[in-house]
Image (tube, rainbow, N blue to C red):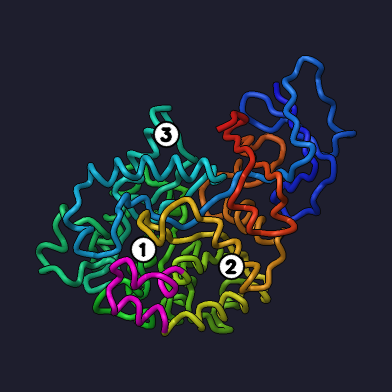
């Protein structure tokens, strides 16, 4: 048994922080938590003193890609081997864990499933991985490799999204991913920034196709995430049962009403847009991607502010891929942007990266420091409650009660 004394304890639920908090951990899980005076500490327990620190639940990046690439040039992505990228991704997950991210949601990669298995069996260190495996796109959609001949883009060696058209193919694709053991299904209901021949405003997949994905996923209790940037594609995703909206550049009032009606979570991924505009031209991002990012940036930040003001649940997700300037390790940037650009308090940004982010995955025992949950804990000597930038510098990280 382990007793962790905390100067300030943030439990991730949105409740007020607790001064002089205490967490009691046994077999990797929280067995008691609250003010120190209310939590009995057995004399035989191991004591951990973070009485001068701010302690929060392990952070969760609810939208990233374990691609393992080290380039932002699309042609490099198709030339690199799966083995090389998986090897690099093992380094990325170690970095994520060391920087306080004890769980991640991988929304589109070939490495996600094997990396998850290697972490779970103790072969490599890393956070808890929830993965969609490869995502799904329609022909000429965001996940189609537009710059390749069609027969190449649809081959098993092309990487990227699996191309499916028609409700039957979508249904079969979802069943294939469920058979592989995916934790969620990832689809594209609009075009995007880094796809060559479509645009964020263009709606993709029909209602029947989206319903096929959501019906199959919900039948086995896993969620569906949709890359959805333009207004029509956001609405069609929400109306047809999608659980999380990724990016959401052009949210209008009807979209906000649908969020309220459905209870869906919004994962805006401000960090990648910020880095694309700030430094993308230094790292080989194609000009078409840079132009689309610049054109959408103001609307993206405005949509996120309006969603926040409307009370839509917002989760931390970066959309980081692995290469500079989207390298894993600086994923706390999303929380920093929530505070500096959206108007969240530091506490709200922490909750977005803990309790709310946990709502995007099929697990009810992470994201908050409550009895029965995994003892995933991060301590900070300099409090992120006073300066959100302190999230970049954890003093100690614990996964399942064990110090990383």
Q: What span is in magenta?
A: 275-294
Percent position of residue 359, x then y: 58, 54
Image quarter in which the C terminus is found: top right
Disc 3/disc 2 C-alpha distance (Å): 30 Å
Residue 337 got which mark? 2
Badge 3 element: helix
- For marks 2 and 1 on the same chain, the one whose residue lies earlier in the sequence: 1
Kindly indicate whether the residue at mark 1 contacts the one at mark 2 (C-beta within 8 angstroms).
no
**In the image, what residue occupies the spot 36% across and 40% down?**
90
Label 1 crowd (10 A; few <14 / some 14-19 / many >=20): many
**In the image, what residue occupies the spot 25% across and 76% down?**
196
Residue furthest to the front: 282
Residue furthest to the top: 44
**In the image, what residue occupies the spot 28% across and 55% down?**
173
Percent position of residue 248, x then y: 48, 74
Residue 119 got which mark? 3
Main secondary structure of the magenta stretch? helix
Q: Which residue is mark 1?
A: 187
Percent position of residue 108, x then y: 35, 55
């Amino acid at each position: 048994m382990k007793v962790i004394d905390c100067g300030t304890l943030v439990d991730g639920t949105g409740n007020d922080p607790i001064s002089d908090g205490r967490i009691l951990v046994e077999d990797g899980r929280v067995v008691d938590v609250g003010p120190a005076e209310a939590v009995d500490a057995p004399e035989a327990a191991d004591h951990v003193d973070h009485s001068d620190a701010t302690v929060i639940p392990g952070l969760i990046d609810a939208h990233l890609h374990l691609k393992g690439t080290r380039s932002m040039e699309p042609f490099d992505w198709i030339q690199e081997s799966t083995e090389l990228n998986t090897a690099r991704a093992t380094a990325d997950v170690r970095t994520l864990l060391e920087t306080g991210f004890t769980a991640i949601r991988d929304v589109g990669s070939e490495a996600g499933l094997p990396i998850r298995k290697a972490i779970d069996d103790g072969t490599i260190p890393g956070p808890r991985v929830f993965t969609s495996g490869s995502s799904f796109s329609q022909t000429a959609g965001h996940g189609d490799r537009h710059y390749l001949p069609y027969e190449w883009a649809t081959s098993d060696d092309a990487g990227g999204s699996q191309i499916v058209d028609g409700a039957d193919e979508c249904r079969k694709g979802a069943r294939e991913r469920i058979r592989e053991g995916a934790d969620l299904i990832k689809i594209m209901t609009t075009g995007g920034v880094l796809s060559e021949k479509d645009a964020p405003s263009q709606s993709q997949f029909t209602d029947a196709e989206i319903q096929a994905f959501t019906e199959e996923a919900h039948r086995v209790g896993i969620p569906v995430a949709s890359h959805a940037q333009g207004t029509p594609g956001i609405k069609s995703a929400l109306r047809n049962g999608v659980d999380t909206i990724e990016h959401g550049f052009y949210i209008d009032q009807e979209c906000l009403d649908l969020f309220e009606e459905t209870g869906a979570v919004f994962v805006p991924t401000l960090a990648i847009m910020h880095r694309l505009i700030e430094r993308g031209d230094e790292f080989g991002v194609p000009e078409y991607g840079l132009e689309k990012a610049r054109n959408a940036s103001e609307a993206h930040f405005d949509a996120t502010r309006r969603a926040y003001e409307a009370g839509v649940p917002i989760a931390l997700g970066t959309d980081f891929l692995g290469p500079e300037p989207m390298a894993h390790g600086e994923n706390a940037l999303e929380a920093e942007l929530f505070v500096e650009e959206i108007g969240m308090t530091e506490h709200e940004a922490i909750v977005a990266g803990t309790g709310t982010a946990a709502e995007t995955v099929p697990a009810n025992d992470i994201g908050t420091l409550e009895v029965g949950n995994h003892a995933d804990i991060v301590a900070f000597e300099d409090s992120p409650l006073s300066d959100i930038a302190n999230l970049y510098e954890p003093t100690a990280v614990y996964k399942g009660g064990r110090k990383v």
